[in-house]
Image: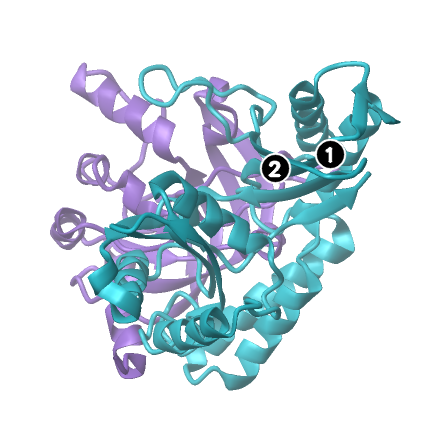
């Protein structure tokens, strides 16, 4: 593996535009979790003209629903969930200033277009490496929608959170680049 | 007649939920290690290293392998000479699931109603329970918690007899290519062939109870399993970011079907193919 690139948050468009598909990164700072139910709630709030409970400017969103923390731990197991389920909501969320997304799996063309427009990077964490990823999370604070339980919007303080750039701000897709040499059908 | 108390069932099921969530079966762990040895993609190797390390951390620290600790799928074989005392069998199973998921710090991922309200039941019940009556006086319980990153990519095709073996391979491959990097590969692929639409789906789930290193007893189906595995590993999907280890195993189960039909169902499981079993 090539040298890992260190990223500290807040994550600006300038930082985002430097990253290329296939880059391996370690993220330090804060990232914000939100998944299906929170995305639905937030886009509905926006449609009603309401202000969101979180300022998403220069934030990285993590598609996550963790297991409950054991006593003494900041968080339980906390790997990425499938990003594609958030695609219907993502262009509207990117309008709110998000510059990075962490999840797993492919994205719809409409999401990639919105990423290019706003200079957003999509990272993948390793799906199912949830106990390992938990080691890089130091703090977990619920910010909004506590009633959603594991789907609540929360701030995670992370140190050297491992991820890979899978779609960069120019739309280059590492899932396609990575699979092509090994497709022998 | 042999008697078993429901309290015993509750306790065992609770324990099984925790075990399945924390401890990756040894055959799957070994399959991941073999995959790491043969993987051609450097990024794929890095991903497999993380997955293997993750399984080791989960086991040594009693932590869930994955945050999606799944919906509890339970397969029961109830001996017809067994008497269950103190309450209902399904209630006991659900009580055990609620207890295990709560005590074990597992995620509660079940909503009571799927479309309008989607309210979380807060204890991961109800379980999906399949019950089969068998001879004897034992109770066999198999638990396979199922995450939905992979479940969402499962599928079914109603083929016709003329489609034959090539049609089956094509149908499985189409579902796998559609799933691509999403279901947390390397996958374990359960295939159900025959029966009715619902039975094929059931067989594809049941196929995932079989260890990854045990092939179908029927030589033709064992050969089909090997051929499907080779085919899936040529897709390039690899361990999520491309490579040669797209699947760890393909398990096929088959059943009698109608003269006009050839149903093929595929249940995709992620690399965390979790299960536990008890005979009471």
Q: Colour of chain A?
A: purple
- Work out which quarter of the rendered image holds the C terminus of chain A and state it: bottom left
- Residue B208: assigned label: none
The colour scheme applied to this rendered structure is: by chain
To which residue does mark 2 refer? B74
Residue at (60, 58) in percent of width and height: B210
- Residue B13: assigned label: 1
Circle 2 residues within 10 Å: few <14, some 14–19, many ≥20:
many
Rendered image quadrant of residue A132: bottom right
- Is B188 displayed left or right of A57 in the figure? right
On the same chain, marks 1 and 2? The answer is: yes
- Is A51 displayed left or right of A171 in the figure? right
Q: Chain of mark 2?
A: B
Task: Please tell me whether mark 1 sits on a helix, a strand or a loop.
Answer: helix
Contact between labelled residues 2 and 1, with CB atoms less than 8 Å apart: yes
Q: Any idea which chain is the cyan one in this picture?
A: B
Rendered image quadrant of residue B2: top right
Residue at (61, 23) in percent of width and height: B123
Q: Chain of mark 1?
A: B
Give the Cα distance between marks 1 and 2.
9 Å
Circle 1 residues within 10 Å: few <14, some 14–19, many ≥20:
many
Rendered location of residue A182, percent (x, y): 32, 81
């Amino acid at each position: 593996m090539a040298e890992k690139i260190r990223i500290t948050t807040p994550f600006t468009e300038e930082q985002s535009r430097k990253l290329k598909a296939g880059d391996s990164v370690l993220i330090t700072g804060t990232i914000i979790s939100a998944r299906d139910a929170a995305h639905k709630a937030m886009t509905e709030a926006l449609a009603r003209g309401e202000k969101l409970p979180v300022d998403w400017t220069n934030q990285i969103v993590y598609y996550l629903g963790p297991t409950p923390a054991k006593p003494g731990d900041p968080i339980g197991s906390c790997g990425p969930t499938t990003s594609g389920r958030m695609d219907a909501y993502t262009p509207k969320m990117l309008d709110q200033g998000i510059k990075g997304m962490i999840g797993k799996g492919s994205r719809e063309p409409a999401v990639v277009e919105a990423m290019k427009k706003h200079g957003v990077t999509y990272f993948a964490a390793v799906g199912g490496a949830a106990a390992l990823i938990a080691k890089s999370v130091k703090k977990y604070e619920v910010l909004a929608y506590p009633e959603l339980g594991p789907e609540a919007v929360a701030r995670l303080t992370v140190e050297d959170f491992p991820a890979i750039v899978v779609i960069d701000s120019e739309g280059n897709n590492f899932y396609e680049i990575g699979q092509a040499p090994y497709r022998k059908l | 007649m042999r008697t078993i108390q429901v309290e015993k069932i509750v306790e065992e099921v609770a324990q099984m939920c925790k075990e399945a969530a924390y401890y990756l079966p040894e055959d799957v762990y070994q399959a991941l290690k073999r995959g790491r040895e043969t993987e051609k993609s450097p990024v794929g190797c890095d991903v497999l290293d993380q997955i293997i390390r993750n399984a080791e951390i989960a086991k040594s620290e009693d932590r869930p392998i994955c945050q999606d600790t799944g919906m509890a799928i339970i397969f029961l074989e109830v001996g017809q000479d067994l008497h269950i005392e103190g309450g209902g069998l399904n209630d006991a199973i659900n009580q055990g699931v609620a207890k295990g998921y709560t005590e074990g710090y597992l995620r509660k991922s079940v909503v009571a109603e799927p479309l309008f309200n989607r309210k979380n039941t807060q204890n991961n019940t109800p379980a999906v329970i399949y019950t089969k009556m068998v001879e004897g006086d034992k109770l066999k319980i198999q638990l396979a918690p199922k995450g939905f990153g992979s479940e969402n990519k499962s599928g079914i095709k109603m083929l016709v007899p003329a489609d034959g073996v090539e049609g089956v391979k094509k149908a499985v491959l189409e579902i796998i290519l559609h799933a691509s990097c999403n279901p947390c590969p390397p996958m374990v692929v359960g295939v159900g062939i025959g029966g009715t639409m619902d039975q094929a789906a059931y067989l594809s789930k049941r196929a995932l109870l079989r260890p990854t290193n045990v092939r179908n007893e029927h030589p033709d189906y064992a050969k089909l399993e090997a051929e499907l595995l080779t085919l899936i590993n040529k897709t390039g999907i690899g361990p999520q970011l491309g490579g040669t280890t797209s699947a760890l195993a393909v398990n096929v189960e088959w059943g009698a079907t109608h003269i006009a039909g050839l149903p093929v169902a595929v249940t995709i499981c992620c690399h965390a193919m979790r299960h536990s079993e008890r005979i009471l």
